[in-house]
Image (spheres, helix red, strand yellow):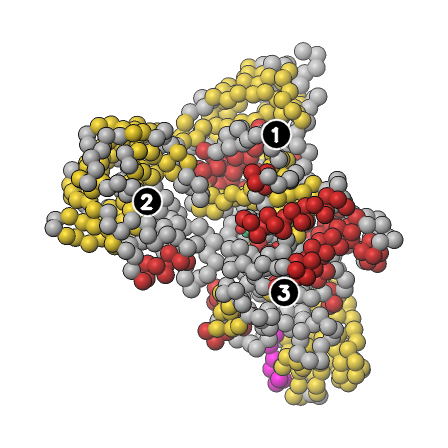
Amino acid sequence: MSRIEIKTKNRRFPIAQNLYGIFFEDINRAGDGGLYPEMIRNTSFEDSILPHGCVDIENGYAMVSPTGWRDEFNHGEGLSRWVRENETAETPVPGWYCENADMRLDTLDTLNENRKASLKVTFSPDGIIYNTGFYGVPQKKNAGYLFYMFAKADERVVLSIETEDDNHVYSQKEIVIDSIEYKKYEVMLSADGDCENARISLRCKMGGVIKLGFCSMMPLETYQGHGLRMDLVEKLRDLHPSFLRFPGGCIVEGFTRDTVMRFKNTIGPVWERAGHLLMWHYHTSNGLGFHEYLQLCEDLQMEPLYVCNCGMTCQARCSLLLEGEELEEIFQDTLNAIEYATGGTDSKWGRVRAQMGHPEPFKMNYIEIGNENFGNDYEKRYVKFYTEIKKQYPNIQIVANTHMEEHGFPLDIADEHYYNTAEYFAENVGFFDHYDRKGPKIFLGELSVVRGFVGRLYAALGEAAFLIGMERNQDIVELSSYAPLLQNMNFKAWYPNLILFNNNKSFAIPSYYVLKMFGRNRGEYVVESKDTADVLYRPVHGMASLFGKPGLQYKEAKWNGNRVEVTHEIMGEIEAFDGKYRIVSANEQQKEEAKRMNGADTDQILVVFGEEEAVTGTFDIDIYVEEDREIIIGVYSSRIPNGEYVFDETNPPKDWNIENVKPFYWKIVNGISTLSEKPDAKPIALTEEYHTPIEKNAFNHFSYYADGRKIWLSINGQLIHEVSVPGFPSMASVVCDTEAQVIIKAVNMSSKADEIEIHIDCDVESNYQAAVLTGDKEDQNSMDCPQKVRDREKILQGAAKTFVYTAPAYSVNVIKLQKNRRG
Ligand code: AHR
C-alpha cells in the first residue's frame, strides 16, 4: 500500500503553460506519403540522384559523403530492409515502372532551376508507366483526389488509378498534352471503391514521347483544408500539444553542404522547392515546409519551436563546418525564416508569406540553435546566432543544445535528450529535483524508452514516472516532447515512434495515451504533496567482467567457489601464461567493431566471465596491482537489450559489445575504490571513494557477493562497500489543482494493484473521475488491435479527506477530484 499526502493550501508554483508539446521530424517517411499526404513517390524523379559531392559505392547499394559518412542508398530506394520487406522490384527511377516504354532521366532539360531531373518516356503502342506510391496508392470510395503534372509533348495519355493487375480501375481521365514547353495539366479524380495498394498509371495508346517535369496526387480531404493528412493531425490534436518542435532532429543538421535543412527550400509552390536526401535515408520533396508547419501550429494552437541549422552538419556523421560566406548564408536563412513567420507584409519575407495566403503573421516565440550540437565549433556559431537573433527579436526565447551557461554563454532554455530503458526513467523520477533554479529553463526535447519493452505498456509506465518527476519540477522544466513522432509502417528507420501509420490507417503506442492523459489534465498550480511507496529493484543479472589496459594480470577467477573461464572477449583478448592470465590488445576485427561503436576505446579491454542468468553469487579473483593501473571489475555483466534503432544494417551492433554490456563498475586505482554505473556517457557514483589497504606489485584478492538487491565488495578479505542495487518507487505521483479540481497523476510500476491511501487537506465530492491506462507489462497496440492499451475513463465514488484509490497493477492514473467548496 502506498500513500499520498496532499496540501492544496500550499501551492508550490503555477504550471508551465507549454509543458507538453510534440516534436516532428521527417524520419521513417513521416513527411511525404505521411503527414504530407503526397501519393506519388518520387514526384520529381530525383530520388536516385546523389547529393552533390557524394559518391556511390558497392554498386549503388551505399554512398559516401565527402567527409566520409556512409549510408545505405540502394539507387535511391533507401534502406535495404525496406527494399526487402516491401519486395520492391528493381527500377532505375525509384517509385516508377514501365511496360512497353522506356524511361530515362534527363538532367539538363528540367522544369526549373531547382529540379535536378525530368523523366523522358518513350511509349511503344499501348505503353504504360506507373507509380506505386508509398507501398501502394490508397483509394477511398467517393473521395476526391487532385492529380497534376508538368509535361511537354504532343500526345494523349490516359491517367488511371488502378489495381496492379489492371483488374479494377478506380478512376480514369484522358489528358491531352499539347505544349512544347512544360505546362501544368490538372485533373480531379473520384474513387469508385476502397483500396490500399493501387497504382497511378499513364498510358499512351498510340505510342509517343513525353517529358515529365514534376507530378503529384493528393487527397482533397485534408485537416482544415490545409493539406495535411486528416487522421494523423487528429491524433496530434488529441494530445493537446502546446508547441511543435520542427523540422528535426538530425535532418536539420544534414551530412553535406546541400543536405543541410534550409528554410528557403521549403516555401513556394512545391514543384519549385529544392528537395534533398534526408539523413534518414530518403529524399524529401519539402512539400511539408516552413509554412505548412506554421499553419499546423495555428490550426492546433501550438507555439512553433523552429530548429535551425547552426552552420555545421551532424557531428555524429563526420561533421562538416560551414565558415565564411557559407556560414553567413545559413545564418541569413534563419533570419529570413523568422521574418517570414513574424514580419509585416511590408517586409520582404512577410510579403512572401502573404502570397502564400497568410497575410497575418504567425507566432514565433522559440528558436533552437542547432540540434544535438556541442563543443567549441558549436559555441562559436551559437554565439553569433544568439546575439543577432536576440538583437532583432528580443522576445524570442533561445533554446541551446547544451548547457551553454556552464561555458559562460547566454541562453534561455537548454534542450536535453534522453533515450533509455523504462527502469532508467522510473529510477530518475527525482532527476530535476536538484536543478539550479537560477539556471536556464529546461526543454526535455527528445525522450523515449528505446531498450527493453520498446513500444509496450511498461515503457509507457517508465516514461510516465519520469514525466511525473518533470511535472513536480515544472518551475524549471518548461517544455517536453516524445521522440520520434511518426512512422510509416513500411519504412522503419527508427523504432519506437509514437504513431504508426500505413496508407489509410494509423494507431498509437501506449506512450501516446500517457501523453494524452497528461497533456489534457494540467491543472493550474502544482501543489505540495508527498508520496510513500515500496522500492522495486532494477532487474539485474549476469556474472562478472574485467576491464583493463593490456598487461593486466589475474588468476584464480571463481564463481561460487568454482573456477570460471572468460566467455566473451569484447575489446581484446586473454592469454594464458605460467598458470596466470593476461589481457592483451584488441585484434583487427575487434578494433573495427570498436570503431563502429562510436569510436570505443580499444585500449580498455573488456572480458566477461560466465553467462548472464546468475543473480545471486560470489565472484573471487586475484589481480596483480601496479602503480597507476586502473582495475575495473564489472558486477552484473549481462547485455542490456539491443536498441531497436539500427542505423546501418550491414553492420548491426553485435549482441555482446561494449554498448550493450553495462555492469556496475567497481574501480580500484592507487588504493582508491568506488562503485559506479554508466547508463550514459557520464558515470554515476554509487559509493563514496574508499582508501583501501592494497599491496602494490603483488596479487591482491578481490571478491564480491551480490543477491539482486545488494552488492558487498571486499579486498583481501576486508569488506569495502555494501551497496544497494538502484531501484525506484513502485508508485510515483504529482498533484496539481485549480479552483475547482484536484488532479492527481499516479503511476503504479508494480505487478500488483496498489491501494493508495490518499490524504488531502480540503473537502472533496465523493463522486470522482479517473482516467486509467493499464494492462500486461508487455502489452502493445497494433494495426489489428489499435486500442488494446488506451486510457479508459471511470466514474468512481468514495473520495474524501482520507480515502483509498486502487491503482491497478502496471497502471497510469489521472484522478480528478472535485473540490467541495462548502467544506
Ligand atoms: O529522434 C530521432 C533522433 O534522435 C533525432 O533526429 C536526433 O535529434 C536524436 O539523436
Q: Residue at x 61, y 59 (%)?
A: 322
User: Where in the figure is residue 166, as x and y percent of width and height?
Assistant: 62, 75
Task: Say what secondary structure mark 2 lies in.
Answer: loop
Q: Residue at x 67, y 76 (%)?
A: 117
Distance from label 2 to label 3 (Cα)? 43 Å
Indicate which disc residue 638 carries.
2
Q: Nearer the viewer, mark 2 or mark 3?
A: 3
Dot 3 or dot 1: first in sequence order is 3
- Please check the rendered image and state whether residue 99 is part of the magenta-colored stretch, yes or no: yes
Residue 559 sits above or below residue 263 on the image: above
Dot 2 or dot 3: first in sequence order is 3
Q: Nearer the viewer, mark 2 or mark 1?
A: 1
Indicate which disc residue 438 carries.
1
Dot 2 or dot 1: first in sequence order is 1
Q: Is residue 494 left or right of residue 169?
A: left
Q: Which amino acid type corresponds to the residue marked 2 in the rendered image?
A: Ser
- Location of mark 3 (residue): 258
Residues in magenta, as a range: 96-103
Residue 378 sits above or below residue 168 on the image: above
